[in-house]
Image (tube, rainbow, N blue to C red):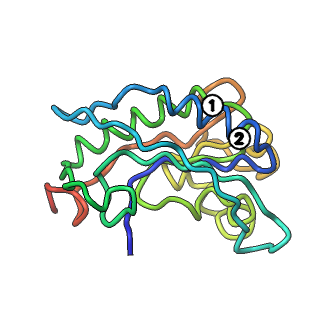
Amino acid sequence: MAVMFTLVVNFGDDLEAARVAAATAAGWPPLKAGHHRIPLHPATITSESSEYSESVVYAQLSVLPVAVGFGAAPDRRLPRIGLTSEELTELGRGLYGLLAEFDGYLAAMVGWDPDSLIDTEYLRADLADELANGVPGGLVVSEQLHRDLGAGRHFAPFAPGFVWIPWRGVEPSTLTVDKP
């Protein structure tokens, strides 16, 4: 099973906005992570179905840094770049910088396999209490989705039209070279 540190973005039914974002990512320079400069794989756009409503299908954009995760198909022949929590935090901030250039999305997040956390039906059905308490950190939503969710005071401005629960970065774990 692959474990990927990635930026995932839910564009709802706005496939054109996802394509524009993919083109933006394609021209993005390598991101800093300590002394490393990490390029990005070409962004992928997939059609995803909500776990909570089979009728809800959305365009998901994924931006994967090269050789950072574990077992990702595009990295199969590459040596993995082991990063500290501090380096992953810097890399994550770079991915959020890229996200700030996107428009037309509903929800987005950077982290280790954050895909389920950008499913708007999941946010509505199961995360209302967490959102009211400022969890999960790093979740970015459109201002419209924020209003629809009644998500509360823990959100701060992210980019024009978007708010987020500020991200605190990556903690040492078994996925970092500075294990706890």
Question: Where, quadrant-wise, is the C terminus in this rendering?
Answer: bottom left
Q: Position of residue 119 (x, y in %)?
A: 67, 60
Task: Give me the residue at 70% from left, 50% from top.
Answer: 151
Q: Nearer the viewer, residue 2 or 108?
A: 2
Q: Which mark is residue 45?
A: none
Residue, disc 2: 105
Tag 2: residue type? Tyr
Q: Nearer the viewer, residue 158 or 66?
A: 66
Q: Position of residue 29 (x, y in %)?
A: 39, 25
How dense is the environment of label 2, judged by Cα within 10 Å: few (below 14), some, or many (20 and up)?
A: many
Left or right of 166: which side holds 162? right
Left or right of 29: which side holds 179? left
When the figure is inspected, residue 118 is found, relative to residue 92, above or below; the finding is below
Instruction: Return the residue found at the far front.
Output: 77
Tag 1: residue type? Phe
When the figure is inspected, residue 133 is found, relative to residue 127, above or below; the finding is above
Q: Nearer the viewer, residue 68 or 151?
A: 68
**The image quarter in which residue 86 lies:** top left
- Helix, strand or loop under label 2: loop
When the figure is inspected, residue 19 is found, relative to residue 11, above or below; the finding is above
Q: Which mark is residue 102?
A: 1
Task: Give me the residue at 56% from left, 49% from top.
Answer: 44
Task: Give me the residue at 76% from left, 44% from top.
Answer: 15
Instruction: Return the residue found at the far right.
Output: 55
Q: Position of residue 177 (x, y in %)?
A: 15, 56
Spatial CA distance of label 2 from label 1 is 8 Å
When the figure is inspected, residue 24 is found, relative to residue 131, above or below; the finding is above
- Helix, strand or loop under label 1: loop
- Dots 2, 1 in contact, CB < 8 A: yes
Q: Position of residue 87 (x, y in %)?
A: 23, 41
Left or right of 157: which side holds 26? left
